[in-house]
Image (cartoon, rainbow, N blue to C red):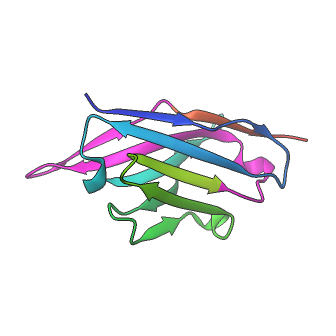
Amino acid sequence: QARLVESGGDLVQPGGSLRLSCLASGFSFGSSIMSWYRQAPGKERELVARITSGGEQTMYQDSVKGRFTISRDNAKNTVYLQMNSIEPEDTAVYLCNAVSPRPTDYDSFWGHGTQVTVSS
């Protein structure tokens, strides 16, 4: 059974840093594209960052470019989101997503999220 467990969310002051982690199990993590999404109250879920299966390519939402870094450790089945220069607008539940290939299509798995609150 596929499982994604996020951790690392916290209350942080503007300008601070956090590192989120997402531990995966029950599917082929090393073959999967991994992403971080976020959802703020009253807003739609939005893609924050994505990384290819081997970590060769990454992409970011414009608002986090230069501040956030996505990375992965396939030996540990974990994907990370390093968040620097955090802004109040970054307050949201951060969710991990895996897109795992199958022979003719793919599976998509979600974690339950970790809360990041930015406040002074």
Q: Which residues are magenta?
A: 83-112
Q: Could you tell me which residue is drawn at 29 percent across and 32 percent down?
A: 2
Q: Position of residue 53 (x, y in %)?
A: 32, 60
Is residue 51 placed above or below 80 in the rendered structure?
below
Spot the residue most to the front: 75
Q: Quadrant of residue 50?
A: bottom left
Q: Total of numbered circles in the picture?
A: 0
Do we see residue 44 in this rendering? no
Q: Could you tell me which residue is drawn at 33 percent across and 64 percent down?
A: 54
Spot the residue most to the left: 103
Q: Position of residue 57 (x, y in %)?
A: 41, 71
Position of 52 compared to 116: left or right? left
Q: Quadrant of the N terminus?
A: top left
Position of 47 compared to 119: left or right? left
Q: Position of residue 74 (x, y in %)?
A: 36, 54
Q: Is residue 59 magenta?
A: no
Position of 51 compared to 9: left or right? left
Q: Is residue 88 magenta?
A: yes
Q: Could you tell me which residue is drawn at 46 percent across and 50 percent down?
A: 79
Q: Could you tell me which residue is drawn at 51 percent across and 47 percent down?
A: 37
Q: Nearer the viewer, residue 45 or 70?
A: 70
Do we see residue 21 in this rendering? yes
